[in-house]
Amino acid sequence: MPEEAFTPSGAQRLVEAAVGAGVEVCFANPGTTELPLVDALDRVPGVRAVLGLFEGVCTGAADGYARVAGEPALTLLHLGPGFANGIANLHNARRARSPVVNLIGDHATWHLAADAPLTSDIVSLASPVSGFVRTCGTADGLAGDVLAALAASVDPPGQVATLIVPADCQWDPAPSQPPPAPRRPRAAPVDEETVASAAKAMRTASSPVLYLGGAALGERGLSAAARIQAATRRPVFAETFAAKVERGGALPWFQSLPYFPERAVEALAGADVFVTAGAPPPVSFFAVPGVPSTLSPPTASHLALADPGNDVAAALEALADALGAPERVVQDPRPALELPSGPDLNADVAGLAVAALLPEGAIVVDEGATSGLGYTVRSPFAARHTTLGLTGGAIGIGLPLAVGAAVAAPDRRVVALQADGSGMYTIQALWTMAREALDVTVVVFANRRYAILGLELIRAGIDRPGPIATALTDLSRPDLDWVSLAAGMGVPGWRATTADQFVDHLRRSLSTEGPSLIEAVI
């Protein structure tokens, strides 16, 4: 008798469709309900599967990959509780407008009514962090469902898309071939009237301010903003926590709006026209008595040159042309950074050393919190590089972002500037770095405390915190041993207590293949 023709499963059709749409990576922490998809990743070549030991590593890595590659990565997560473990970094991905597609396994459709222990309302969990949520209904529809999720994720300016995949839809046969991948939509152009209105406002206002975010912080946007500043001689600010910023070399640099709202209000005081490009108007990170939530002056008129979903760089170039700006702004020569030396080591010294030794084309992931300023203020004087920031304020993104960035750009060195407290949220990322042999240099600023909370206590008028408040911001007793923690996950590490030690360890790490860690005791 002739052999029966093999019909691929729904899971195989899903992976086939994803590969056809250009997906190359899946950051996974699967469970029982995702095993048909795990099997499909073996049967259908083309997707690199990267294991994360915690779902927050997977979601943060997918964010980092998307920011660097500009393409969506998949995550593969186990039911509602597994997805819930990754929500914090999906919150950051949503704020970064990163194209991320979550595949969440669910119980078989006919098993849901049994209310098994892991049954949950996945749609309600996914909706707050996703711009697109869909529950698959049939095996034959999975390919189309994943293509719809991928298309939604790259709809400008980008968003998180979540696909809930019941187990029977994964294992049931799917006779239909996957449909063709849809064409990727382009960012919408800004109309001439909007550009003309912005140009007129900036010409006639006494104190216009240009505020940049999103795609405006790429090379084209920065160059156009420098032309606008040359034509208007007025301030230009960048958003405080940007998803991705090009820095260093001969690139223009603009001050980020201060984090503390009082300082931000001072910086923008007197502005009568507030022009935004690639970001909404800035607001205070937290409520502060006596400080308005919106940081631009209430008397200033707001004009949105380009929303995040627009072609922001082209809009800035058109505005520069409308203002009669010079075709090119030559940056003044920047002094070379001198390496620190001596017995003292603090966050400023470590940041200077990082900026001075940063290799050309590096990617810096900055979750240094209060300790990152030393690098930030020197970054314009460093070699040309890219910085990824903490967009949504949910700490624990730094090490996972570094994983995703290194997977997206294996030819570029990734340097993760990591506060010790937030690093502990997703320390499992070190294991993934070791397993994947990623070229990541991790610098841990070990100040043994949640320093930002100490500052916020003082700002709240609590200048003499009691024993409980002190204990809840203190990371000592016992001190975290980052070198041992890293070694336990396969990452070599060194401890630095002086500037000389830190510089030596940093040189060594930057010239060594694979991941390594420096604990800077500050």
Image (cartoon, rainbow, N blue to C red):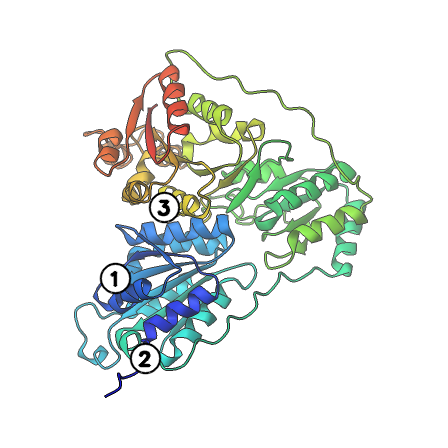
Marks 2 & 3, CB-CB < 8 Å contact: no
Q: Is residue 233 left or right of residue 433?
A: right
- Residue 125 visible here: no
Does residue 377 lie above or below 176 as drawn? above
Residue 400 bears which disc, if any?
3
Residue 61 bears which disc, if any?
none
Q: Residue furthest top?
A: 342
Does residue 240 lie above or below 93 as drawn? above
> Which residue is labeled 1 in the image?
81
Residue 7 bears which disc, if any?
2
Task: Name the amino acid type tagged 1.
Answer: Pro
| Residue 354 screen position, x and y as percent | 46, 26
Q: Nearer the viewer, mark 2 or mark 3?
A: 2
Which of the marked residues, 3 or 1, is nearer the chain's N terminus? 1
Q: Is residue 251 left or right of residue 39?
A: right
| Residue 390 screen position, x and y as percent | 44, 44
| Residue 336 screen position, x and y as percent | 58, 20
Task: Name the amino acid type tagged 2.
Answer: Thr
Query: In which image quadrant can residue 350 be found?
Result: top left
